[in-house]
Amino acid sequence: MATGEGTARPFTILTVCTGNICRSPLAAQLLRAQLADLPGIVVASAGTMADDGAPMDVTAAVQSERLGGDPSDHRSRYLTERIVAGADLILTAERAHRAAVVSLVPRASRRTFTILQFARVLRGLEPADLEAVTDLASLVTTVAAARGMVPPPADPADDDVEDPYRRSPEVHERVADVLAGAVGTITTAIHSTTAGGSRG
């Protein structure tokens, strides 16, 4: 995906949670801020049970701003088959969201991960594992191939981001920091992949 004759279409990263008002927009806004220097990347979000058009949760928006995101224009949207089909990398808040994505578009399974899983696998890769990575599509393929080889967490739930909705500001801050850590790992890998020469 994101290739073809002439001008290649943008590489699209989609983040997914339940209501698309806390975790997925926060992750998307942090990704967007940290990838702003890469014009060939589009970041979007959606929710498996979202109401179309809702603004971001106020407490989550505060965390986005704290970490450099811009929540001002966010409007929630319901996850559809079309949205999934148009994404090159799908990062979900929980394993249940990943299952929902794959149920909509089964062939999306190899490009769909929880955001913590994707970051965890990236951290587990050796430099040699990345030798064949020449673009973002091959980065996703490499992480998908390594998914079964990098040791999983002792508790599978450790690949899920807890839901802060209607919880305290302290929970929102903790969740935001977890997401920020994962986003930092992912954007570092993306910048490395797109930086100059054969990685362009």
Image (tube, grey):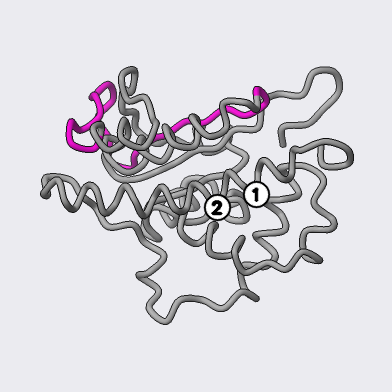
> Tag 2, which secondary structure?
helix
Look at the image and give the residue range highlighted in magenta: 39-60
Residue at the bottom extreme, as displayed: 154
Residue at (67% x, 51% y) in the render: 140
Q: Is residue 162 magenta?
A: no
Given contact means CB atoms under 8 Å apart, are the residues at marks 1 and 2 in contact? yes
Q: Secondary structure at mark 1?
A: helix
Judging by the rendered image, the residue that carries numbered circle 1 is: 189
In what quadrant of the picture does the C terminus appear? top right
Above or below, comparing residue 8 to residue 88 in the picture: above
Vertical position of residue 126 compared to residue 183: above or below? below
Q: Residue at x 61, y 60 (%)?
A: 122
Residue type, label 1: Ala
How far from the left and from the top, in percent, is residue 38? 65, 27
Residue 115 on image: x %, y %:
47, 53
Q: Quadrant of residue 130?
A: bottom right
